[in-house]
Amino acid sequence: MSATKKPRLGPLPKTESVKLTFACPASLKADLDRYAALYAQAYGEAVDAEKLIPHMLEAFMAGDRGFRKGTTARSAPSKPT
C-alpha cells in the first residue's frame, strides 16, 4: 500500500478572481502540471495548474519575511505630530 504525499498547498478556498496573464518557461509549466496531478491525487479534486498558481504565490508571499516586514511598515498608521 503506498501512502500519498500531500502537497504543501492545502485545499483551495473560494475567492473572487481577477484575470492575469503571464509567460513562463515550458519546464515550469510541466512542473505546475505535475503539481496539479499530485494535488488531484491528494485531495481527490482535479484542478488546472492555472487555478493553483494564485494560491502558490499567496503562500509564497505570506512566507516571505522581508515582504511581510515591508508591508507592515507601509501599512502602519502614522503617529500624530
Image (spheres, rainbow, N blue to C red):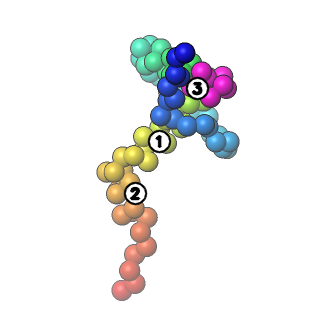
* Distance between the alpha carbons at the discs numbered 2 and 1: 15 Å
Label 2: element kind:
helix
Residue 80 position (above or below residue 55): below
The amino acid pointed to by label 2 is: Thr
Residue labelled with disc 1: 59
Q: Are marks 2 and 3 in contact (CB under 8 Å)?
A: no
Between label 1 and label 3, give the one nearer the viewer: 3
Residue labelled with disc 2: 71
**How many residues crowd mark 3 within 10 Å: few (<14), some (14–19), many (20+)?**
some
Residue labelled with disc 3: 42
Determine the main secondary structure of the stretch shown in magenta.
Answer: helix
Residue sitting at x 38%, y 54%: 68
Residue sitting at x 54%, y 15%: 1
Toward the left, the furthest residue is: 66
The amino acid pointed to by label 3 is: Ala
- The answer to which image quadrant residue 13 occupies is top right
**How many residues crowd mark 1 within 10 Å: few (<14), some (14–19), many (20+)?**
some
Marked residue nearer the N-terminal end (1 or 3): 3
Q: Is residue 63 on the magenta stretch?
A: no
